[in-house]
Amino acid sequence: MKIKFIHTFYIFIIGSLFTLTNCADAGDDSDIAKDTELGSPIINSATNVTSEGFTVSWTRVYNADGYELDISINEDFESFVVGYEAKSTTMFSEDVYGLDEGTNYFYRVRAVSSTEKSKNSGVLQVTTLEANGPELTTYLKDTATTFYVGMAVKSDQLTDGSKYDEILKNEFSSISGEYEMKMNIIQPTKGNYDWSKSDALVDYATANGINVHGHALVWHESTPDWLENYTGTDAEFEQEVKDYITAVLTRYKGKVTSWDVVNEAINNTDGSIRSTVFSQKMGNDYVAKCFQFARDADPDVLLFYNDYSVTTDITKQAAIFNLIDNMQTNNVPIDGIGFQMHIQYNSPSVAQMETAVDKVVDRGLKLHFSELDVRVNPDKDITELTAERAVAQKNKIKEVVEVYNAIPTENKYAITIWGMKDDESWLLSFYNNYNEWPLLYDTNFEIKKAHTGFLEGLK
């Protein structure tokens, strides 16, 4: 009996200690939970979009007593839609009414409790629909009177009487070869030039009073195999490049008014000169050398440097303008800069575009928005072109044209659309995404709202 009692006593003591330890741990956990920062909601894409409103929803946040919703017409939330600055709600969604039709809105939400507020959720964009009505049908080139309106074309599209031919003659005052005026097409093997496709483009333009912008003399992605794998000396390689540039510009002197001399020479990662066969064999100053070769071959042609992500990649933007500044300081001939403008319906912002554009104007150069298309499905979240995205694309095109049209006339050159109709855009194969509608015309050659946006941007 005594042994049994002692055994039971020890079990009681040990159990009590275990219970006390657990209670202490529970108290610590409660303090930790109490001090944990309130989580931010995850906001969802808007639904039930109409011409005057939409529904926005978000995820529940543990320990939140409610939420505050902000809605603005700019992504920096410099001002708010009346009634939607920190609008309080205890629900997980909000029906928004009383908005303007065909307008971009930005929204965000944060959780609140009795003691704190969370950080804001991410910011999403939604575009209210437009009342149904006819799209504007004025021709682009008739409205854009201070700069060229261009189109990227292929030689097999230029058959007289075709739909391409009809639209090009009516709408566009300039063309660029989408890929048929590049080195691997014109000089596929050493010493052998094939002018057939480039001549077709230039002859068509000359016959129809259309400007030609040449694209592009030197680009690492269009280097023919024989030059990419060149076995001669560096000096011989440089002479090959000079001979090529001289041959092309001599052939088209007086017929092609401008050229992208070098395309995409700057790395995205750090703004350095991209390592290519050109930089490896000619040095990092190969860009300047190519511009000088071009000027020596044609004293009158306009010479452009062309690149992408100039408005959104600040590191790359700085590097490009450093390159340009060095060229200007050393009297290297350069007349303009091409911003490729492969953009999205929700990016870049007007402020980003204006900042980059001003840098061109400040340097007294011409600006070419050279390869414009506007993706409406960058996140692959739609399977058809919705009314909302069509209006959002229209609004972005309008912003692009407004920004460009506002610069001084002497700095303008052209806005070139990179392709005619949606189903032929290079983006379809590049992103392996066939649900994309980035251009001004649909698959049936019918104008889209994006076309109207271009015209509205010129007003």
Image (cartoon, helix red, strand yellow):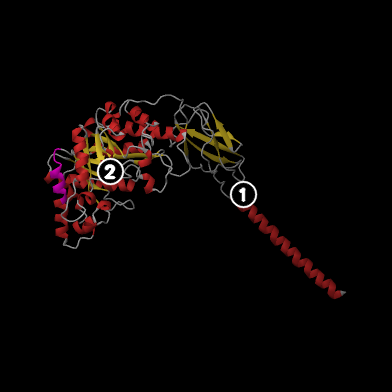
Q: Quadrant of residue 328?
A: top left
- Dot label at residue 178: 2
Coordinates of residue 162 in the picture (x, y in percent):
29, 34
Q: Which residue is labeled 1 in the image?
A: 34
Secondary structure under tag 1 reads: helix
Magenta stretch in the rendered image: 244-254
Coordinates of residue 454 in the picture (x, y in percent):
34, 31
Task: Please indicate, yes or no, whether residue 403 appears anywhere in the rendered image.
Answer: yes
106 and 156: which is toward the camera: 156
- Say if the magenta span includes residue 404: no
Lateral position of residue 149 relative to residue 67, left or right: left
- Dot label at residue 398: none
Within 10 angstroms of label 2, few (less than 14), some, or many (20 or more) residues?
some
69 and 281: which is toward the camera: 281
Q: Is residue 221 above or below residue 384?
A: below
Q: How many numbered dots are placed on residues in this image? A: 2
Q: Quadrant of residue 230?
A: bottom left
> What amino acid is labelled 1 in the image?
Lys
